[in-house]
Image (cartoon, rainbow, N blue to C red):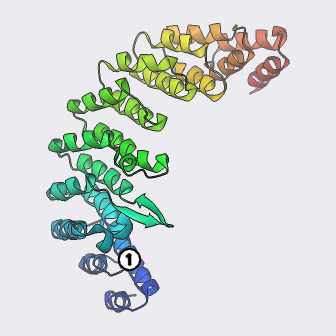
Amino acid sequence: MDAEQVRKRLRSKQTQDRIGAVRQASALDGPPRQALLLEALADKSPYVGALAAEALGESADDAAALAMTERFAFLSEDGPARDPGCHIRGNLAFALGRLQCYAASDVLRVGIRTTQIEAVGGVPFDTAAHLRGNCALALAQIRDMDSIRDIALLLFDRSGFAHGLPDPKVKMEPRKAAARALSLTGNVQSRLPLTLRLVHPENEEPEVLQECMQALVELEDPHALEVLEPYLQHRDMRLAAYAALMIAQTQAPEAAALLGETIGRLSGDPLRATVLALTTLRTPEATELLYALTRSEREAVRLAAMDALPPNAASRTVLEALSAHDPSPRVRAAAKSAIAQ
């Protein structure tokens, strides 16, 4: 289908035709593709506009990026009427970040502060959560260093709670995105809000705290170990195990000993994850600890340690001893299986 045929379909009265036209326009090459998608961006159907915004993020020149920025500003003037659900602006934010459009900084700052309460199934709902998150990530992608303050404020965003809205999992998504965005900035100034959130985690979701931990390590904070270590004693074993994994990623000299102390209080998947984290250290201390764990009084620890042993002669000797003499049938069977592999 050529550009003119797509244009005619794009002006159909049937929404389904226009949706198909956007997909066909996306498959075109050259200037017609961009022109058609910009036309679709202004479609009366928010779904058509959102599809066009997404496609424009794949390739758009400076003129198109400016038009996208202007469209974002127009939609923001009356979000509930012009962009119900915030789908168009959410996709525009993603696209502008992907295009690294620095000129979009101001509208993205509007988006990162937007709360849009709409009735979804008769229940008040903040439909702008994903918009705030996408704007945070876009501001980081365009390397707007002045935006660190805006992103940091989003990390502490409680707007959904202020409106008494349900579903905490939705409310936390902007804060998770803010943590990722702070990491993407690559700026040492981003370490401070992440540290504050981790040191004062009151009422925060574990998933958000995990994002903050990872961001702090990715930013190579020299004080990361000091911030992460208290989490090894957290009552949430999954959060403690995640902290252990992040500590292992710091490659700090104390990491092996800290993980060894933590393993004693963990069970299930968190236990196995923390034992496996030892393998990322690649130090004599970590390897020695793994061998020591095969002699633990706890069956679960011995089983986890076997899975993490390095593939060498020393490990084979340990496995042979376990297969012959361990009091647990499960451990003996697992050791025999590991030897046979």
Quarter residue 255 falls in: top left
Foreground pick, 58 / 67: 67
On the image, the x and y values in percent for residue 271 come to 62, 22
178 left or right of 297?
left
* Residue 296 visible in rendering: yes
On the image, the x and y values in percent for residue 223 come to 31, 18
Q: Is residue 12 above or below residue 223?
A: below
Provide the residue designation for mark 1.
Answer: 48
On the image, the x and y values in percent for residue 194 come to 31, 31
Q: Residue at x 78, y 25 (%)?
A: 337
185 left or right of 212?
left
Foreground pick, 187 / 339: 187
* Residue 30 visible in rendering: no
Quarter residue 339 falls in: top right
On the image, the x and y values in percent for residue 311 come to 63, 20
Q: Is residue 220 above or below residue 321?
A: below
Q: Quadrant of the C terminus?
A: top right
Q: Residue at x 23, y 49 (%)?
A: 139
Q: Mark 1 is on which residue type? A: Val
Foreground pick, 150 / 36: 150
Q: Residue at x 71, y 19 (%)?
A: 300
